[in-house]
Image (cartoon, coloured by chain):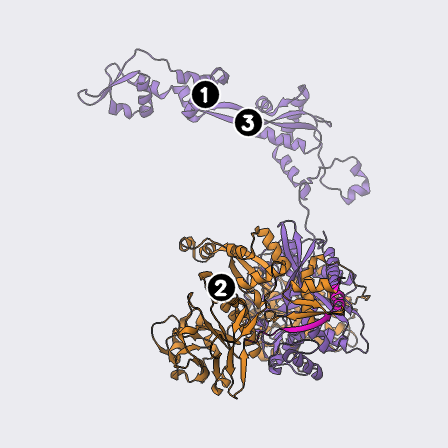
Chain colours: A purple, B orange
């Protein structure tokens, strides 16, 4: 079990003998004892005592241990050598006999180099460069006092406090002394103090429950800092979780879902019926996927098609039209739909064919396709969210009101609207919301009132207005889940760990 | 959306005041523009070519302003300033007028019958006694470029040529000739070329090569001559060098040749309304006559003003405000739509100037009233539309099943609806012809050749991208595939599929089989031959021989399950055994 594994490990490391010796020592002293003192009085390494302290701590409130750290000076390896054999300079001095020693011979001594220069600067020795037979070194004084050795011996005996800070630092610079920090514990009795260690159970067993033996047993405490075991489960994709929430919002607002399960659309329903002229850049090969097979659509409602052709090429319904040569061949071209508004057009046309007009609220969330250049935020396919309301007498104020309600459900309450252009809506508005993190207004969607040139040829009554808005599903999802590259979210390159780890989706929080 | 780049200080000078960036951004927002970027030539060059190249460049502050795609009247500094000044009540919209030449007859452009096959329309006008400055000249060139890129659809619909009228003499002839019969010195070149040579010459020109295709394969190329046989231009490719304009040009002859006459008239109106501001008689344009092959003569530019009459009630009821006719007339006047209330006070007469070709219906006027009123001043209301919500049954079923598949321990994938032909055919060991796939004619890469006919390749690619994850991997997706179907108007339909894969060191057929049993349980279909579901051994090249079964429900085949063929596993760059389930869920609606 993860929660107790750690403690079992410590118990195995330190045998119970040490633990009990430790506890007896703690029992004897008043007010506590340092773990270093324990180590020296038990004659074991300090680390063993530290292990024992941790093991006892794991048993509950037997002892209390407060970590402390203390600093003290220690001799380095070289320092120890000097304490025993004398400093390099002293050893050099001793090596020089009455008649002197040639410099080259002196340098061969183990302490030669360092000792020579130190002894020179101490003015213990001098060098006769012009001596026949090469430079020769002679004693300058009768006797010397090896202060360095003496100081090191003092430290060795634990009297480092007798040296001045300056002296210690000098020896530290010569790499003879070092200052070490020792972490130890101040051990005191705990609320459950006892000098006897009882064996602890790791887990409750069916036998203990049956026999009632659990009442007498002590149980090892759990380590609540450990992570639990992940449950075996499947996971929903984050984008689809967000889709579910948007569906829910539309349903709460009384919107009916449109059948958008037709990725292939004719240019007629995708563009012409929306009063989007045939030379419009969106209808270019660079923006739209056209089909080679099946390349063209058939079976258009013929009289409606004639009305669409007329309003484009000549105008009508109070419109000047675009005054160009409208071609059926363009309208017939099959494409991958560039927006779900193509489905809205089909639905509104269907609505117009009803015996009597009834108000509707429609929504859809489904895939659309653009033959665009791909980057970190654009793919060739994405999900469009769309809402449509058709009724008599709807106003631009109504559109703003509906958008306000919709975005409030997403947790966005501060909205403003910018005039924009869209071939099939007039007025057209870009929807901006205030982003607190970025400290600026960011575009969150597009909206507008469908043009009469789109609605009247369908046969909708004159006084009926249709308001609509749209946004992408990917963008709010990327913001919600903090994803910067769309490929990590959509498509086969998704990181499944991200899917496993993604939280529930509450758009309004 | 076109972006216009203007020098900030020139803009402020023309607007008669300075703004902070925030103030100007705010003004743009209100007017339906977007201050997209604040930059300088230096910034732009240093970003595109590095700091070194930029050291010489100007650091004059530039505003890059996004203009709505239908507002050609805002594509240059002159138009932007005029629009904003009228909007802020700083000036009245000018009245543009077409005038006769001071002396002599109007310039004349004669169209010959040969143009009919390639580019049949042409319009023309003269800007008389214009004063350019370096800034105005740049703006004039820039406006033509913006128009070419937008309304002219990269010169396919309309091409503009502007000429120094004092270097040429009318009448001008717009004709079409065989490429070898056209010879002239093109703009900024030192020697004459034949049109055929020119087309070769410009193949490598980074700017002009994009327009060559418009006439390249035509037997006759369009060309305009003056009365002395000097070539003005070979539209839509290049002008002649002889008549090129400069900052010192005083009289400009403008011709627009087109395949769409409506757009040509708009383009001509835009150029002359914008730049007649700099003529000695501001906002006047000298007319030119265009003679058609049938002898018909038309005078251009049209500069037509149109009047629409509408009621205050129409505006109020569409926008959701309650303004008097007078106040609405004032709002519209601020949008360059000069408006007056009729004498009986009931209606508003709105005059649409030649600069506002975007206004084609009363609803466009209504939008302008709303903009001038301020979108954000309109009271937000709740429509009383009463409706009952319904889910689309197929999506409702999908939502319910997704949740239960995740509950069953499978993780949802979301894969692309478009893929390569290889993905749905070769890699699954299927023949492309048998897939009933729809094919895309203009994919930029192989990833978008077809719409998927099965969800399986997407799931296998998801496995391949996640091979480092702990095994087993259990994935599912419920989504649409696309199949050819002659019975629909477009010849294709979507089909909603449920696909799941189990990827582990052992094939786990029993796991995927168990998932099928669970799905059927959820769909309330019991095991059984007649009114239930059963599986039956099947041959399928995607699956390992003897390890594939067809699934029948109520006697109809709904899909397959089995252990994938090792070659399929390899082709998707996988290394472990894998079993799969692939069914159509539409029969369960």
Q: Label 2, secondary structure: give it.
A: helix
| Residue A182 circle label | 3
> Vertical placement of B385 versus B537: above or below?
above
Q: Label 3, secondary structure: give it.
A: strand
User: Who's the residue at 70% across and 76% down the image?
Assistant: A318
Q: Residue furthest left?
A: A132
Viewer-proximal residue, A385 or A111? A385
Q: Specify the quadrant that holds the N terminus of chain A.
A: top right
| Residue A154 circle label | none
Residue B517 appears in the figure = no
- The residue at which mark 2 appears reads as B139
Q: Is residue A3 left or right of residue B387?
A: left
Q: Dot 2: few (<14), some (14–19), or many (≥20) neighbours within 10 Å?
A: many
Return the chain for callout 1: A
Segment colored magenta:
B301-324
- The residue at which mark 1 appears reads as A168
Determine the CA span between mark 2 and mark 3. 78 Å
Q: Residue furthest top?
A: A142
Determine the CA span between mark 3 and mark 1. 18 Å
Residue A9's spot in the image, x, y percent?
63, 38
Q: Dot 3: few (<14), some (14–19), or many (≥20) neighbours within 10 Å?
A: few
Viewer-proximal residue, B271 or B218? B271
Instruction: Give yes or no for residue B315 being in the magenta stretch.
Output: yes
Q: Label 1, secondary structure: give it.
A: helix
Q: Is residue B4 left or right of residue A102?
A: right
Report the mark closest to the observer, 2 or 1.
2
């Amino acid at each position: 079990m993860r929660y107790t594994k750690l403690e079992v490990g410590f118990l195995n490391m330190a045998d119970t003998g040490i633990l009990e010796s430790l506890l007896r020592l703690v029992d004897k002293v008043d007010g506590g004892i340092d773990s270093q003192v324990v180590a020296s009085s038990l004659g074991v390494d300090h680390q063993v005592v530290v292990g024992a302290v941790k093991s006892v701590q794991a048993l509950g409130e037997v002892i209390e241990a407060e970590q402390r750290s203390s600093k003290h000076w220690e001799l380095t390896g070289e320092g120890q050598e000097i304490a025993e054999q004398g400093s390099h300079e002293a050893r050099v001095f001793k090596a020089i006999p009455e008649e002197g020693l040639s410099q080259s011979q002196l340098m061969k001594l183990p302490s030669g180099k360092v000792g020579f220069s130190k002894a020179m600067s101490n003015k213990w020795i001098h060098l006769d460069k012009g001596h026949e037979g090469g430079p020769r070194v002679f004693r300058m004084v009768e006797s010397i006092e090896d202060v360095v050795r003496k100081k090191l011996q003092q430290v060795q005996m634990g009297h480092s406090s007798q040296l001045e800070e300056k002296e210690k630092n000098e020896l530290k610079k010569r790499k003879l002394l070092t200052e070490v920090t020792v972490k130890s514990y101040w051990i005191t009795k705990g609320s459950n103090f006892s000098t006897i260690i009882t064996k602890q159970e790791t887990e409750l067993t069916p036998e203990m429950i049956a026999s009632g033996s659990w009442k007498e047993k002590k149980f090892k405490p759990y380590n609540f800092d450990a992570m639990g075991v992940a449950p075996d489960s499947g996971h929903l994709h984050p984008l689809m979780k967000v889709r579910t929430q948007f569906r829910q919002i539309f349903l709460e607002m009384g919107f009916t879902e449109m059948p958008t399960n037709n990725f292939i659309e004719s240019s007629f329903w995708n563009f012409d019926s929306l009063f989007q002229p045939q030379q419009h850049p969106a209808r270019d090969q660079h923006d739209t996927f056209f089909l080679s097979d099946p390349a063209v659509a058939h079976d258009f409602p013929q009289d409606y098609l004639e009305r669409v052709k007329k309003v484009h090429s000549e105008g009508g319904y109070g419109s000047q039209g675009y005054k160009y040569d409208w071609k059926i061949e363009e309208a017939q071209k099959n494409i991958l739909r560039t927006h779900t508004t193509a489905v809205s057009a089909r639905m509104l046309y269907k609505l117009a064919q009803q015996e009597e007009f009834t108000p509707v609220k429609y929504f859809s969330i489904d895939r659309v396709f653009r033959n665009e250049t791909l980057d970190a935020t654009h793919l060739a396919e994405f999900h469009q969210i769309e809402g449509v309301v058709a009724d008599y007498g709807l106003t631009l104020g109504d559109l703003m009101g509906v958008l306000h309600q919709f975005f409030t459900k997403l947790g966005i309450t501060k909205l403003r609207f910018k005039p924009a252009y869209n071939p099939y809506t007039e007025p057209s508005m870009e929807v901006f919301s205030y982003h607190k993190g970025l400290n600026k207004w960011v575009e969150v969607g597009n909206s507008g009132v469908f043009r009469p040139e789109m609605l009247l040829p369908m046969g909708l009554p004159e006084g009926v207005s249709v308001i609509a808005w749209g946004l992408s599903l990917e963008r709010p999802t990327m913001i919600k889940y903090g994803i910067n590259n769309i490929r990590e979210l959509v498509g086969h390159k998704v990181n499944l760990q991200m899917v496993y780890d993604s939280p529930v989706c509450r758009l309004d929080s | 959306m076109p972006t216009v780049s203007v020098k900030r200080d020139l803009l402020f000078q023309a607007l008669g005041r300075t703004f902070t960036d925030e103030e100007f951004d705010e003004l743009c927002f209100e007017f339906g523009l977007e201050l997209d970027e604040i930059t300088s030539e230096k910034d732009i060059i240093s970003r595109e070519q590095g700091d070194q190249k930029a050291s010489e460049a100007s650091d004059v502050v530039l505003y890059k302003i996004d203009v709505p795609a239908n507002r050609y009247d805002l594509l240059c500094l002159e138009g932007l300033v005029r629009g904003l000044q009228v909007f802020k009540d700083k000036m009245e919209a000018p009245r543009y007028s077409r005038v006769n030449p001071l002396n002599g007859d109007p310039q004349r452009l004669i169209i010959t019958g040969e143009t009919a096959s390639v580019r049949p329309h042409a319009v023309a006008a003269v800007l008389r006694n214009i004063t350019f400055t370096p800034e105005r000249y740049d703006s004039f060139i820039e406006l033509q470029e913006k128009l070419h890129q937008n309304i002219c659809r990269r010169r396919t619909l309309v091409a503009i040529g502007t000429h120094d009228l004092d270097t040429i003499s009318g009448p001008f002839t717009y004709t079409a000739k065989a490429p070898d019969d056209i010879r002239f010195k093109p703009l900024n070149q030192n020697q004459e070329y034949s049109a055929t040579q020119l087309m070769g010459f410009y193949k490598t020109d980074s700017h002009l090569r994009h327009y060559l295709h418009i006439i390249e394969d035509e037997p006759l190329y369009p060309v305009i001559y003056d009365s002395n046989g000097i070539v003005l231009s070979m539209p839509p490719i290049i002008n002649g060098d002889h008549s090129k304009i400069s900052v010192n040009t005083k009289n400009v002859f403008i011709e627009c040749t087109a395949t769409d006459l409506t757009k040509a008239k708009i383009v001509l109106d835009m150029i002359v309304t914008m730049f007649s501001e700099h003529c000695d008689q501001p906002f006047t344009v000298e007319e030119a006559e265009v003679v058609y092959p049938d002898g018909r003569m038309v005078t251009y530019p049209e500069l037509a003003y149109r009047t629409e009459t509408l009621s205050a009630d129409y505006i109020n009821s569409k926008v959701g405000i309650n303004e008097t006719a007078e106040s609405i007339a004032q709002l519209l006047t601020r949008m360059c739509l000069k408006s007056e209330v009729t004498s009986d006070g009931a209606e508003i007469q709105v005059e649409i100037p030649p600069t506002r070709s975007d206004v084609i219906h009363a609803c466009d006027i209504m939008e302008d009233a709303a903009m001038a009123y301020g979108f954000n001043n309109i009271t937000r209301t709740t429509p009383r539309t009463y409706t009952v919500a319904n889910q689309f049954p197929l999506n409702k079923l999908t939502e319910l099943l997704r949740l239960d598949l995740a509950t069953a321990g499978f993780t949802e994938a979301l894969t692309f609806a478009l893929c390569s032909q290889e993905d749905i055919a070769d890699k699954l060991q299927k023949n492309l012809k048998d897939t009933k796939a729809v094919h895309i004619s203009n994919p930029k890469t192989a990833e978008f050749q077809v719409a998927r006919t099965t969800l399986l390749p997407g799931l296998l690619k998801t496995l391949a991208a996640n091979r480092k994850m702990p095994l087993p991997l259990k994935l599912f997706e419920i989504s649409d595939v696309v199949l050819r179907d002659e019975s629909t108007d477009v010849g294709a339909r979507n089909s909603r599929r449920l696909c799941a894969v189990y990827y582990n060191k052992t094939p786990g057929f029993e796991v995927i089989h168990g998932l099928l049993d669970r799905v059927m349980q959820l769909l309330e279909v019991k095991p059984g031959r007649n009114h239930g579901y059963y599986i039956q051994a099947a041959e399928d090249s995607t699956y390992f021989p003897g390890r594939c079964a067809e699934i029948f429900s109520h006697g109809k085949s709904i899909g397959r399950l089995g252990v994938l063929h090792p070659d399929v596993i390899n082709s998707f760059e996988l290394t472990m055994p894998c079993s799969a389930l692939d069914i159509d869920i539409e029969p369960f609606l």
